[in-house]
Image (tube, grey):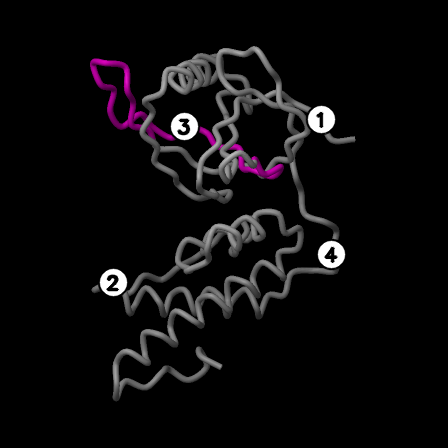
């Protein structure tokens, strides 16, 4: 049975994926207390401590799947107590219960892992990496050869290059099959590349990328 843990909760109008960097400006008193708590527990050196959960908040509605993040660095500490921090997505979690009467939002959560599957489609993964690399060639002055460690989700690492809206990003976060996640990211990358070439008359799309 998956362990239930208590982690601080940070509702935001955004979705963060494992492996993704997320900068945050901390100004509300309760979230300053949340970050202070995370810094104190992280300093204790216990594995997994110092994390909090970023979860999509749509007005009064709070989604039940979010992503635990850890603080990568404190960019700026202001004299009035505000903070600029950079966090990194670590692990998807499912929220079971919100806890009341705490100095900052707190919830009982469990780690969310992929369902068992026959195997990763290696050709699909390579194709998505090629599409993402091709997109960087169109956006950046220097092409960037993208590589994702085999143990990491390429879909999550590359989703930041897509035009997926919040609902689609949340669906991607909740998806338990990497092959299906890769298909979603592939289709989004193809749409972006197609739009770029449509906007540039006379520029042919590279063979093997758009189909």
Label 3 vs 2, first from the N-terminus: 3
Identify the residue at image location x=58%, y=38%.
63
Q: Secondary structure at mark 4?
A: loop
Q: Secondary structure at mark 2?
A: loop
Label 3 vs 4, first from the N-terminus: 3
Mark carried by residue 13: none
User: In 3D space, how far apart are the residues under numbered discs 3 and 1 (Cα atoms)?
Assistant: 22 Å
In the picture, residue 122 is in which quadrant?
A: bottom right
- Of the 4 image quadrants, the one containing the N terminus is top right
Q: Which residue is mark 4?
A: 117
Label 4 vs 2, first from the N-terminus: 4
Label 1 vs 2, first from the N-terminus: 1
Position of 93 relative to 81 (above/below) = below
Q: Is residue 63 magenta?
A: yes
Q: Which residue is mark 2?
A: 140
Mark carried by residue 3: 1
Identify the residue at image location x=68%, y=29%.
96
Label 4 vs 1, first from the N-terminus: 1
User: In 3D space, how far apart are the residues under numbered discs 4 and 2 (Cα atoms)?
Assistant: 36 Å
Closer-to-camera residue (98/59)? 59
């Amino acid at each position: 049975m998956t362990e239930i843990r208590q982690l601080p909760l940070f509702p935001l109008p955004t979705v963060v994926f494992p492996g993704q960097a997320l900068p945050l400006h901390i100004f509300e008193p309760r979230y300053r207390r949340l970050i202070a708590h995370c810094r104190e527990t992280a300093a204790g050196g216990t594995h997994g401590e110092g994390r909090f959960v970023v979860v999509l908040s749509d007005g009064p509605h709070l989604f039940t799947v979010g992503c635990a993040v850890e603080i990568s660095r404190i960019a700026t500490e202001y004299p009035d107590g505000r903070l600029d921090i950079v966090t990194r997505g670590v692990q998807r979690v499912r929220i079971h219960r919100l806890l009341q009467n705490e100095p900052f939002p707190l919830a009982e959560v469990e780690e969310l892992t992929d369902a068992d599957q026959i195997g990763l489609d290696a050709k699909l993964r390579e194709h998505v990496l090629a599409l993402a690399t091709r997109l960087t060639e169109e956006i950046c002055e220097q092409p960037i050869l993208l590589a994702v460690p085999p143990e990491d989700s390429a879909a999550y690492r590359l989703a930041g290059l897509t035009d997926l809206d919040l609902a689609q990003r949340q669906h991607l976060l909740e998806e338990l099959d990497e092959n299906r996640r890769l298909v979603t990211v592939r289709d989004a990358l193809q749409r972006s590349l197609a739009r770029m070439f449509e906007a540039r008359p006379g520029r042919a799309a590279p063979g093997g990328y758009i189909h």
